[in-house]
Image: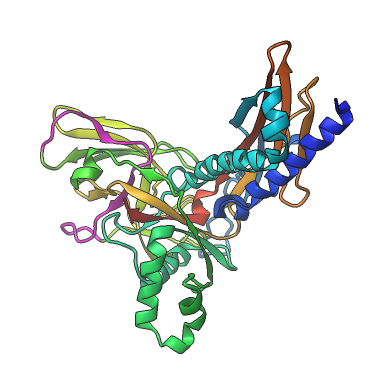
Amino acid sequence: MPTPAQILQTVQTYQMSGLAAMQNFGPFLHTANKKFKNFQDKTANLGSTVTFDLPPRFTTVDSLVAQFQPANQRVQPLVVNNEISTSYAFTDQQFLFNVRDYMQRFGMSAVREIGSKIEANVASLAVTNTYRFYGNGVTPINSPTQLAEAMALFRNYGAISGEAKGYLSDVAIPPIIAGGLAQFAPDRNNKMANSWELSPFADCKWYKSNLLAVHEAGTAGRTGATLTVASVTNNGPGNSVDTITFTVSGAPGADVNMIKQYDKLQFNDGVGAFANMRYLTFVGHQVCSNPVQFQATADAASNGGSAVTVNVYPYLQALPTAEQNLNQQIQVGMTVSVLPSHRAGLITSGDPLFLAMPSLPTETPYPTGNDIDPITGMAIRQYYGSQFGQNVRGMVHDAIWGATLVPEDSMMIAFPV
């Protein structure tokens, strides 16, 4: 029988190989900001949560007479609140004659399964942590021109300088490349033509994923209903949400699924005598070309009179404060459309996608491998044990993680489902 030290070394070896597989599995895990590599050792850590600063927001006046305003510190929480494990069992005979020399393959397969689950969870932030979007969820996104337009709107609102990151549906890549080859001179696209990969352009590096999250819209989004503003309640600046009551076109009456949490909504242009609703730039408060889009923060049911009250994010306000983001106040009679069900891609800049994956403690008395990658800060634990007298050996791979996305530095891309 091998000594405990030898067993520990073996588990450690399998775990290290598996960790390499997971940290390179998908674009979200690979490119996420791992700023908090030693999450469990942070002095600011409160249990499983750490907060980091966001840039303060201010407004200016056209005068040398100072008008003092509150200095509000903005923070974003990162919470390690997810856990995952993959386990399997075998007998002593299976281990000796079939499994022992194959353990690395078992470990790699188990960790890839874990990695795909974590990747999908991080990718879902494109649904939950964004309020701006490009695409209508119906028209295919199949050309570089559309991506360039998305980038233009993303930066027009205000984006951190430097190369952005774009996460696209893998099945959308071939038509986008084909569209690019048809639109531009071939000698300028040799790399793309030869590799059939989407090269960086529009100051953005593009990644592909087959694990983009799908958001199932409520009835208003699925049926293309028009929502007409009936009343607005501003609940406060910062992270507070507003409440807007709409009447729903088509008189569907009571519907518990009228609006679903994370539905994306947009004010319509050309409504009556109203000026088109436009966002102000996030910094500088100047009218930009972005339509006013926002997110429902909770499910909302319509009543028998076809009215639905929706809690929305971000705070929507035209008054001249640091939180001002509209070119005009929301008014009764304006109309809104809801995005249908869609697959959620993403554009980010300034590394606003944060991932923390701290190590777990040694599972005493079981032989345990639990290394942290010194560069990425990602960790996965592996341990095994046996049931006394039962001829059963069990192997466990597990991990914990947390991820967050800063909403103002990101924009969703709505691919048709």
Rendered position, 308 above or below 203: above
Quarter of the figure with residue 40:
top right
User: Residue 210: image x %, image y %?
Assistant: 45, 52
User: Residue 193: image x %, image y %?
Assistant: 46, 78
Q: Residue at x 33, y 49 (%)?
A: 342
**344 in the magenta segment:** no
Looking at the image, can residue 38 be seen? Answer: no
Q: Residue at x 48, y 76 (%)?
A: 192
Q: For this view, does 255 lie left or right of residue 33?
A: left
Q: Nearer the viewer, residue 350 or 366?
A: 366
Quarter of the figure with residue 402:
top right
Q: Which residues are magenta?
A: 251-275
Q: Residue at x 33, y 32 (%)?
A: 299
Q: Residue at x 72, y 26 (%)?
A: 384
Total tally of numbered discs in the picture: 0
Q: Residue furthest top?
A: 389
**262 in the magenta segment:** yes
User: Residue 5: image x %, image y %?
Assistant: 88, 30
Q: Residue furthest left?
A: 250
Q: For this view, does 343 lie left or right of residue 94?
A: left
Main structural element of the magenta stretch: helix, strand or loop?
loop
Looking at the image, can residue 24 be seen? Answer: yes
Q: Nearer the viewer, residue 178 or 64?
A: 178
Q: For this view, does 46 lie left or right of residue 253?
A: right
Q: Nearer the viewer, residue 200 or 406?
A: 200
Rendered position, 364 above or below 300: above
